Amino acid sequence: MESKFYEKDKLLVFKITDEIDDYSVQKIRRRADYEMERYMPKKVIFDFNSVTFMDSAGIGMVIGRYKFANIIGAKFGVANLTQSVKKIFEMSGILKLIPDSTEEMQVS
Amino acid sequence: MNDNFENEMKLEFISKATNEAFARITVAAFVSQLDLNIEELADIKTAVSEAVTNCIIHGYENKQGIVKIVGKIKQNEIILEISDTGKGIENIDMAKEPLYTTKPNLERSGMGFTIMESFMDNVKVESIVDLGTKVTMTKKIKPKIEEEKQEFQLITED
């Protein structure tokens, strides 16, 4: 996973580069929570552009980070959902709660 | 070996989370002898990942055990049996409910069986408490030659 903090907009972007399963989410979770606490962003976006595989562990991971962002007072969004990632998120209904922030990312 | 099946394989590995990727990639390689499209292959990989994760997290609760996968191909049908000899499921109907999980503290979504059921044609769960669980999933693969023909027709009609 790669991350970038845009100081001007207080935007923290996580670009996930691993396959997302029960094993890899443990690393993603630890690093994302650490960086959110460190930068205290106003907005957090998870970029799925490079994700080649995701199972239901991705749902729990995203809900968990969404809750964590709420705690630190940051907005939360997802971006560049691939077809297979979208299929799994839609099944869980979390896209009703979490906005697609792809356009906001291109501005930055 | 059962003669009714054109091909069959068995895979056994230790219940480590690192083996989830190994399991789905190996099964993907096995089923790729059928003519699958990208979506069908992704569906199978996801269903395998869910079943194997269940064995590791719920069946063995991260203690060491053996996860077993039997894969069969019969004409255009894929049959996958994924089993553990772990703690078993007390209430299968409840476990299959979307969003139901016994481990919300681990950020589990409770969507595992729902995903297996929607990505495969049929999912059967057999479980005995303290003896283990076996999930049998099947998926029929649509012949691709017909699809190509239809596309060809569309092009020529233009």
Image: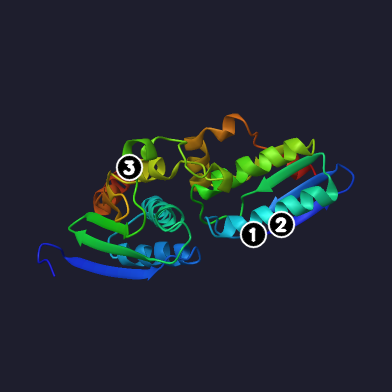
Q: Which chain carries label 3?
A: B
* Extreme-front residue of the structure: B130
The residue mark sitting in front, 3 or 2, is 2
- Residue displayed at 46% across by 66% down: B19
| The N terminus of chain B: image quadrant | bottom left
Q: Is residue A62 in view from this perspective?
A: yes
Question: For mark 2, what is the residue?
Answer: A31
Q: Which residue corresponds to mark 3? A: B154
Residue marked by disc 1: A27
Q: Is residue A75 visible?
A: no
Residue at 38% of width from left, 70% of height from top? B13
Q: Which amino acid does label 2 sit on?
A: Arg
Q: Distance between the residues labelled 3 and 2?
A: 50 Å
Q: Quick one: A4 or B37, which is closer to the camera?
A: A4
* Label 3: how many Cα within 10 Å (few below 14, some 14–19, many 20+): few
Residue B111 at x, y percent in the picture: 45, 41
Look at label 3 and name its amino acid: Leu
Quadrant in the picture for residue B67: bottom left
